[in-house]
Image (spheres, coloured by chain):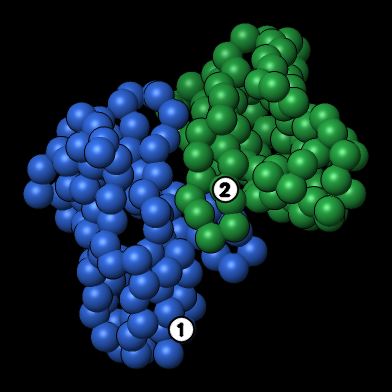
Amino acid sequence: DTAVSQTPKYLVTQMGNDKSIKCEQNLGHDTMYWYKQDSKKFLKIMFSYNNKELIINETVPNRFSPKSPDKAHLNLHINSLELGDSAVYFCASSQGASPLHFGNGTRLTVT
Amino acid sequence: GQQVMQIPQYQHVQEGEDFTTYCNSSTTLSNIQWYKQRPGGHPVFLIQLVKSGEVKKQKRLTFQFGEAKKNSSLHITATQTTDVGTYFCAGDSSARQLTFGSGTQLTVLP
């Protein structure tokens, strides 16, 4: 199936831990994104990555670091997790300015 | 920076009633996109509007883009329980940066 897939679907961890979320797209898109959705459903862009150019949202703490081994993958690594990091994280991809295709999301719970 | 405001934040309707959500941008947009997120799901693209004053329909859904390309609306006629979810507008500026509105969570009571 052509899609944006991210793993894991659920992630429960303790404060202070380091964790990663993986994302892969087989749509042949040239741009990938990470979005954070809080409990009020607000969707905030964290990063976009296009042809090795990383665009960072300045409000994102530097504990969050995206890593893109190739055009089809964009992983998200989070250091020293905090309670406020609990949210649903969505990976998405697009081809240029075309609409976004979202993954199914990763629900992160920090205890 | 670009801001996209969306109202209302929540809307409860009786099945069969109409529903409208409104989106306003602080800057002129090159296009606006609409997405629907079912409860527990992920945002799914519905439609894109590009031209000033454009109106598009998808069955019971009507999408409008304002003449100044700074506002948009989504109207659902005769809502059904399958319409439940959160509807997001997303404005694309000339800088190719997509900014999402805060979303409208629609509940349809049977």
Q: Quadrant of residue B68?
A: top right
Q: Position of residue B44 (x, y in %)?
A: 50, 40
Point 90% across, 39% down: residue: B17
Which chain's colour is blue?
A: A
Between A95 and B79, the one lying in front of the other is: B79
Which chain's colour is green?
A: B
Q: Quadrant of residue B88?
A: top right
Q: Is residue B51 left or right of residue A43?
A: right
Q: Position of residue B91 (x, y in %)?
A: 57, 31
**Residue on which disc 1 sits:** A83
Mark 1 or mark 2: which is in front? 2
Between B106 and A21, the one lying in front of the other is: B106
The kind of secondary structure element at disc 1 is: helix
**Residue on which disc 2 sits:** B37
Visible in this render: residue B102?
no
Point 78% across, 32% down: residue: B76
Q: How many neighbours does mark 2 have within 10 angstroms: few (below 14), some (14-19), or many (20 or more)?
A: some
Tell me which amino acid carries mark 2. Answer: Gln
Point 10% across, 43% down: residue: A70
Check the residue under mark 1 and report the chain it is in. Answer: A
Q: Which mark is on residue B81?
A: none
Quarter of the N terminus of chain A within the rendering? top left
The kind of secondary structure element at disc 2 is: strand
